Image (cartoon, grey):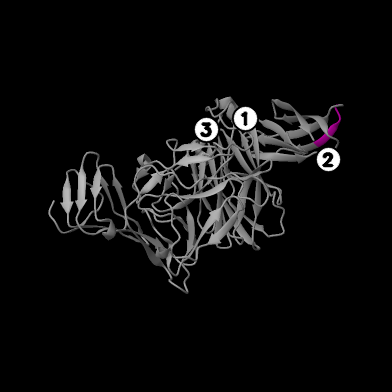
Amino acid sequence: MSEGRTYYPEVNTGANANVKSLILKPSTYLSVPTGKSLVVINELILESDATGNSSIIDNGSLFYDNTKSAYQTYLTDDTWHLISSPVTNAMSSVYLSIYLKYFTETDSLWHYITSVNHTLTPGQGFADWAASSLTGPTTVTYTGAFNTGDVTPPALTYTPGAGTGDGWNLLGNPYPSAIEWNSNWTRTNIDATIYVYNGDDGQYYNWNSNTNLGSMGNGEIPPAQGFWVKANATSPLITIPQSERVHTTKNFYKSSGSKANVLNLAVSGNGYGDRMIVGFNNSATESFDSEFDAYKIPGNIEAPQMYAVEGDYSLSMDILPILEEVIVSVNFTVGADGTYTITASDVESFAGGTEIYLEDLAEDKMINLNKTKVYEFVATPLDDADRFQLHFGFKSGFEEPESNELLSVKIYSVNKDVYVAVPESITGNIEVYDIMGQLVVEKSAISGTLNKIRIHDNPGIYIVRMMDTDKVYSEKVYIK
């Protein structure tokens, strides 16, 4: 390879090479393969701008002058970014005129860094803010040797209770390339989900269920990106493995793939949005699972917030076991009066015949998500938070149903409500009897939807009958 300033667009060096200078432009990347070497005599610069980052992975040998090497990160203005140093011995002086702070889990406090000599320890996460009045959109340049080898962040802590971080620790990608969050990380007493707060809402990825909210793909953490992990017991430990380095040109997560049996819901309104996932896995439980679920991270106070509720837990990713009928309580709040829109995706990831309904308790509406993917409604900050329920109905797990199962009427109850799912091809009446055989409620069934009947009588066992022209469907239910 000839000497001179060299630009690499997506290159793997297939042979030993010497270059005078090496500049990786934004959205380009370079790998040095195992057993090969790359020698950079003068400057080695990895550039970044609004279009993306550059990236380098040295699986082989990379030789360069540490005093002339630099990694750049581009920052938009007037929003918090979670960041981490990709070089050794970086100091806070690289953030002159930029607000910089760190988080302590023991007391759940943020601490502003005012000294220019504060060490940006590899593997530790920080938050920065480039104000429009000071720098506007800007590029931060880290000078020094790029971090290599497995990295152990500063000691993690677990401090449960009011006024503490309750296990939340802010870490960061220490490499000049992306890393992938997966089962190859060494972790002890750490949940299987990572969290990236992007200024308005959260990005999430759980490697156990291989599900994500936002744009984290397969759990890719961009270079120099900060991220949250949650400890769940004392003595938490984690090691960031260099073996999981990957190339991505994705820039920082900041403001502003379908899986089987996973429903994605997105809500938009008032100029903001939020997302949540409900999925199914037989290894999960009906309560919070540190290996599957993800906590809800509150977003901007003016943004809509949508999340599942399981007991005392608020979840943005709720993974549940496969049962015949599943109902998920969904809380919803807004920061301003207005019209909001919920959009469902990945409904087709469920087996044919799986019934999925969104129930709007405030409007007494039942939306069949198999047919209608978009639901528009009005909300105010004074509305009750427990506004929605998700209903999932299926037979014998997620196996493809027989043709007669597609025509089946399904009957179940929740609290004081009876639900009767009636296929389009079936018509007739719904009758509810108490244990003494007295008729309590009678109504005409609406075909092709989930019929809801409120029982105002005493708690106990009731018999629900759905009578078609030539068949009777019957089920015992318990009313609380």
Indicate the amino acid at tag 1.
Answer: Leu
The majority secondary structure of the magenta stretch comes to strand
Indicate the amino acid at tag 2.
Answer: His
Q: Which of marks 2 and 3 is nearer the N terminus?
A: 3
Q: Which of marks 1 and 2 is in front?
A: 1
**Residue 178 drawn above or below residue 293:** below
Which numbered tag is attached to residue 323?
Answer: 1
In the depicted view, which residue is nearer to us: 25 or 321?
A: 25
Q: Does residue 202 appear in this view?
A: yes
Figure quadrant of residue 75: bottom left
Q: Position of residue 274 (x, y in %)?
A: 56, 53
Q: Residue furthest front?
A: 117
In the depicted view, which residue is nearer to us: 150 or 33?
A: 150
Q: In this view, does 111 lie to the left or right of 3?
A: right
* Residue span colored magenta: 437-441
Q: Quadrant of the C terminus?
A: top right
Residue at figure coordinates x 54%, y 58% from the top left: 200
Figure quadrant of residue 167: top right
Q: Where is residue 379 in the image (x, y as percent from the top left)?
A: 66, 58
The residue tagged 2 is 456
Indicate the amino acid at tag 3.
Answer: Ala
Kindly report the distance in space between the C-alpha atoms of the residues bearing marks 1 and 3: 14 Å
Around disc 2, counting alpha carbons within 10 Å, would you say few (fewer than 14), some (14 to 19), or many (20 or more)?
few
Residue at figure coordinates x 69%, y 25% from the top left: 471
Kindly report the distance in space between the C-alpha atoms of the residues bearing marks 1 and 2: 27 Å
Residue at figure coordinates x 41%, y 60% from the top left: 91
Q: Earlier in the sequence, mark 1 or mark 3?
A: 1
Q: Earlier in the sequence, mark 1 or mark 2?
A: 1
The residue tagged 3 is 351
Figure quadrant of residue 217: top left
Q: Is label 3 in a helix, a strand or a loop?
A: loop
Q: Position of residue 149 (x, y in %)?
A: 35, 43
